[in-house]
Image: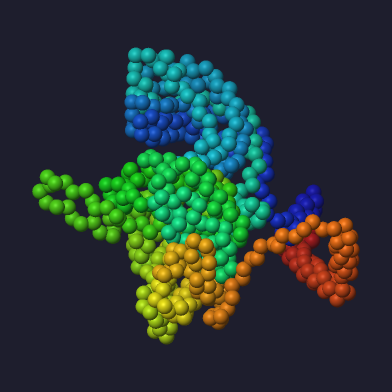
């Protein structure tokens, strides 16, 4: 028997080794359970919820045991668990699965029998009928936590009927003991794929994205205009940026004229934004979608904290839900360039004027908003649970990163801006060194907070200094690349100011600036001033082919196919050599593992079997 167990253990270990080389990432498959198995994440509890402020109170909870009766007894001192609930409340049993992922479903059947409640100073109450409940879960988004991963059974009306003359809240507050027999009759979790790109590839995190995002442009004076319609970013513009080697777009969007006072966004406009993102990503761009506003409601003042928090929450539930299906080529920023545009309200009857607000006051409000919105985004859909999100210090000032505070750091980046360079000439030897230090310092401060910097705006103004602007773009992007980050040139469609192209017809004005950015982001030499951009010419219209032309085309295609099938002998040998090398390496690793495991068994037992 001992020998058989050792052989079985050895074979199991070898099977695991083989699996390491043959199994790739797979979705979470549908899961069922066996009788008597303890399910720590599936909990049974008795709860009360204040219907005024929606605060949730759990009297007690127990992990469940699959398909076996559980004798449950919960005892507490009066007021210890439910002492804070108000006069209006819901009350009852709840079964919840904390392991369900957003988008995952489950089916459940459970019973609760022999229910007895004891309230302080009163006899035991056993007038609640047995419960036999079947439910389907579909875990989905919520502005707080998850919905669709639990089922409640209310006991409120049973208590009210039994004690019609007593206040319900007072009774629930005095609950001291609960006993019942609970049984999880059946439970099955459905399949869950998890975050992934539309092509099924792995959803990448922040650091992998930064390594691939290349050069970028920040498209201002378009969707961030107060009266924008959603049509300002054209196909010709995208082609122009792609021709210059630009890989990433930073797109602030102003929703003010398409949104109600409560934060409800017009779905037709939101659909236009989604279409723009989809079109840009289909052309190979990364897109950072940001939120801007033209109203004072976005000023991070303490007096606006609550009202704006509510409005932002509703906005981002809509935005994040709409964008969840996009893969990792979409990043979302919480707030674009947050800054106070409104002065605090002053009480005219106050004896003394209030102390002026400082950066710490603004940051306190910003931190609360940003933390809340990150939770909102994370709580929507599937891909949003791991999508890279950008936060920003007050005024997007890189020197204020040290004063920022936030609770989450997973796939989080910090958006900062550098003012456009205004001098006519760019002194590479002096100014480039200073610039390099500024970017590196910003990123070092971000690393202290386990995040990374993305420079979402920089540039150099047009002062008839094309050469100097090209050099500035190259040096700045090089500094960003050396710091491990990416940088976006501030594009406004006005070539007399800072624009690289004209929005009117997407004509190239300063293409070498974009080419220089792309070269610097790739670690290549700065292109010559006469370098040309890559353009996509439309397909010429042709007449319908004649029968003879069709036959010639078919003959040509057949010849090409035959040529492709005639693989050179050298290529075959190269492929065979590669296969042999891989097989040898795997074989050595496999044999080595067998020897190690055998020695381990020998050491423990004195023999191989």
Q: Quadrant of residue 100?
A: top right
**Of all residues shown, which one is farthest toward the left?**
351
Residue found at x 58% / y 54%: 279
Nearest the camera: 129 or 263?
263
Q: Is residue 190 left or right of residue 513?
A: right
Residue found at x 42% / y 14%: 161
**Of all residues shown, which one is farthest toward the bottom?**
429
Is residue 117 at all visible to an observer of this figure? yes
Q: Is residue 609 above or below residue 483?
A: above
Q: Quadrant of residue 261?
A: top left
Residue found at x 84% / y 73%: 571
Q: Is residue 339 left or right of residue 211?
A: left
Is residue 38 at all visible to an observer of this figure? no
Counting labels gives 0
Question: How is the rendered protein coloured?
Answer: rainbow
* Quadrant of the rendering where the C terminus is positioned: bottom right
Residue found at x 38% / y 43%: 311
Q: Quadrant of residue 19?
A: bottom right
Nearest the camera: 17 or 406?
406
Q: Position of residue 348 (x, y in %)?
A: 14, 46
Nearest the camera: 483 or 171?
483
Q: Is residue 532 above or below residue 46?
A: below
Q: Position of residue 526 (x, y in %)?
A: 54, 80
Q: Is residue 60 left or right of residue 171?
A: right
Nearest the camera: 389 or 156?
389
Q: Position of residue 320 (x, y in %)?
A: 50, 47
Q: Position of residue 510 (x, y in %)?
A: 50, 73
Q: Is residue 210 left or right of residue 579?
A: left
């Amino acid at each position: 028997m001992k020998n058989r167990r050792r052989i079985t253990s050895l074979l199991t270990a070898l099977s695991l080794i083989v699996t390491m080389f043959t199994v790739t990432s797979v979705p979470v498959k549908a899961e069922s359970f066996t009788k008597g198995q303890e399910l720590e994440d599936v909990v049974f509890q008795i709860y009360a919820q204040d219907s005024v402020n929606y605060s949730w109170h759990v009297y007690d909870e127990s992990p469940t045991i699959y398909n076996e009766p559980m004798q449950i007894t919960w005892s507490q001192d009066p007021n210890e668990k439910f002492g804070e609930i108000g006069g209006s409340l819901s009350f009852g049993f709840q079964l919840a699965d904390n392991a369900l992922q957003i988008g995952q479903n489950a089916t459940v059947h459970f019973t609760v029998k022999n229910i007895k409640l004891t309230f302080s100073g009163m006899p035991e109450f056993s007038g609640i009928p047995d419960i036999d409940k079947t439910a389907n879960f579909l875990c989905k988004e919520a502005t707080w936590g998850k919905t669709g991963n639990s089922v409640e059974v209310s006991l409120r009306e049973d208590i009210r009927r039994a004690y019609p003359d007593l206040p319900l809240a007072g009774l629930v507050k005095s609950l001291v003991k609960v006993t019942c027999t609970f049984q999880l009759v059946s439970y099955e979790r459905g399949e869950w794929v998890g975050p992934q790109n539309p092509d099924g590839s792995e959803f990448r995190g922040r650091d992998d994205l930064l390594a691939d995002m290349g050069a970028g442009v920040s498209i201002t004076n378009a969707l961030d205009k107060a009266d924008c319609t959603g049509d300002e970013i054209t196909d010709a513009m995208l082609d122009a940026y792609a021709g210059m080697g630009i890989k990433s777009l930073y797109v602030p969007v102003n929703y003010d004229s398409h949104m109600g006072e409560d934060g409800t966004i017009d779905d037709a406009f939101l659909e236009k934004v989604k279409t723009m993102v989809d079109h840009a990503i289909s052309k190979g761009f990364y897109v950072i979608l940001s939120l801007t506003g033209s109203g004072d409601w976005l000023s991070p003042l303490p007096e606006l904290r609550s009202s704006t928090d509510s409005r932002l929450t509703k906005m981002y539930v809509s935005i994040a839900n709409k964008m969840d299906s996009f893969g990792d080529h979409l990043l979302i920023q919480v707030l674009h360039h947050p800054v106070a545009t409104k002065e605090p309200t002053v009480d005219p009857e106050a004896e003394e004027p209030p102390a002026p607000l400082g950066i710490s006051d603004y940051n306190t409000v910003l931190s609360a908003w940003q933390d809340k919105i990150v939770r909102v985004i994370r709580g929507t859909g599937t891909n949003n649970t791991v999508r890279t999100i950008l936060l920003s210090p007050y005024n997007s000032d890189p020197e204020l990163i040290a004063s920022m505070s936030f609770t989450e750091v997973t796939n989080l980046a910090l958006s900062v801006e550098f003012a456009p360079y205004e001098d006519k000439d760019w002194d590479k030897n002096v100014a480039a060194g200073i610039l390099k230090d500024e970017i590196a310092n910003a990123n070092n401060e971000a690393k202290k907070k386990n995040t990374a910097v993305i420079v979402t705006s920089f540039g150099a103004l047009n002062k008839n200094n094309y050469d100097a602007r090209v050099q500035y773009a190259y040096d700045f992007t090089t500094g960003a690349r050396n710091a491990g980050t990416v940088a976006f040139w501030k594009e406004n469609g006005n070539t007399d100011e800072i624009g690289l192209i004209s929005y009117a017809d997407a004509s190239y004005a300063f293409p070498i600036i974009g080419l220089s950015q792309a070269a610097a982001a790739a670690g290549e030499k700065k292109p010559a001033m006469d370098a040309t951009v890559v353009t996509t010419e439309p397909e010429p219209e042709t007449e319908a082919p004649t029968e003879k032309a069709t036959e010639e085309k078919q003959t040509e295609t057949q010849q090409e196919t035959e040529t492709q099938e005639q693989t050179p002998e050298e290529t075959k040998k190269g492929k065979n050599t590669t296969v042999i090398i891989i097989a040898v390496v795997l074989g050595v690793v496999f044999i080595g593992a067998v020897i190690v495991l055998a020695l381990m068994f020998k050491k423990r037992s004195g023999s191989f079997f």
